Image (cartoon, grey):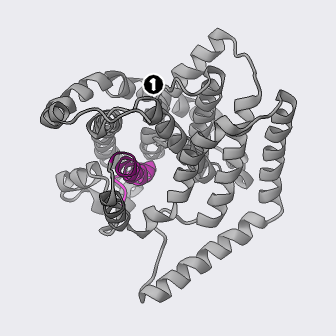
Amino acid sequence: MHAGLAVGERSRSIDPELSVWLDLSRVVAAFFVYLGHAVILEVAPAALSLTWWRSADDAVIAFFVLSGFVIASTTRERPGDAAGYALARLSRVYSVAVPALLLVLLLDLAGRSLSPETYAGYAWQYEAIWRRLLMHWLFLGEGWLGVAQPFTAEPYWSLAYEVWYYLLFGVWTFVRGPARWAAAALVLLLMGPWVLMLLPMWWLGVALSRWLAATRLSPRAALALALACAGAYAAFVLSGARDALDAASRALYAAIGGALGRPFSGGSTVHVLPDAVVALLFAALVVAFAHLRWRWPARAARAVRWLAERSFSFYLIHFSLLVLARALGVHQAGWWGNAGVLAAVLLVTGLLAAVGESRRHLYRRAFAGLLAPWLARRPPRPAA
């Protein structure tokens, strides 16, 4: 989520101009995830790979920081109770997760009928389909049961991380007394080692939401910080430092595996040490954005917000559409074919958002009915 991926929440405690910068970051990150995957699947030319950016991996880490930042900010300004927090998170996540996985399944079944060899690596996923859907709607694809993504929805892995972070944050925020520590420890145990490894990146966003108000930068200093972040990122990649940290990550996984007496793959957390550097650089960039004092034109701000509100759907569905494009042979159609694929992804994103993200109130109403007894008997939590 996407990054939830900072899942499109609006926070009154976040300055409106910073909110536009965050939305723009979400849109750009989603596009670079798309670009990285399009190159990997050979639907986009290798010339667009920008491999030194490692766009897909680094963009997801930015999503994690954004998500922690926005969730913490919105929760702090709307103190409510645990049931209200759960209602907001459940309706937001399932309004996309349910229709997205059903759509992915339909796309995959259609693609398999056209080009079974394209889907050969996913063949085992289409056995016991309803059991797999239930597993992934419970976000168990990155835990103790092993690592598996639903069908061709490979970006879904990050949602299986974020939902556990939402749960941990809710426990820490709403449980009081000694029970807080016990409940938090239980969640940490249940989430499993792979999900745990990226928790610091998400929690960095939570910490940033509290630290930001204490920072003071002039617009000139903020611009200098933003440029420094960009320069530091380029140096991190071009100097080979990221490659060195990749090797250190592999050594870390090997050491963990040795301690456990079995191989430790890291799940989808394959670059944990360079990911930490990317998270810190992006957090610093958010600080810079908060102090630039750039006045966005109203029309541009609306356009950015409109795109950002659909970025979650775009993120979850794009990989499956790219696989389908490959099954159809579009990856051999040149630049016009590449442009057509992107246009198709955007079109399907709009359709998915129309039945998912844009209908979030219906999911909220359904979950409100399920949580009605809890909502009725729990008093509001006092404001902090």
Q: Is residue 142 above or below residue 339?
A: below
Quadrant of the drawing holding the C terminus: top left
Question: Is residue 364 toward the left or the right of residue 289 in the image?
Answer: left
Locate residue 255, reporting x and y percent: 55, 84
Question: Is residue 10 toward the left or the right of residue 225 in the image?
Answer: left
Locate residue 358, reporting x and y percent: 36, 22
Is residue 122 something that shows in the picture? yes
Is residue 43 something that shows in the picture? no
Q: Is residue 156 magenta?
A: yes
Locate residue 252, reporting x and y percent: 58, 78
Amino acid marked by disc 1: Leu
Residue at coordinates 33% horizontally, 51% vertically from top-left? Answer: 176
Residue at coordinates 75% horizontally, 22% vertically from top-left? Answer: 293
The residue range painted magenta reads 147-174
Question: Is residue 217 toward the left or the right of residue 341 in the image?
Answer: right
Q: Which residue is mark 1?
A: 347
To which quarter of the image does residue 194 belong?
A: bottom left
Q: Is residue 161 magenta?
A: yes
Q: Between residue 228 and residue 331, name the one nearer to us.
A: 228
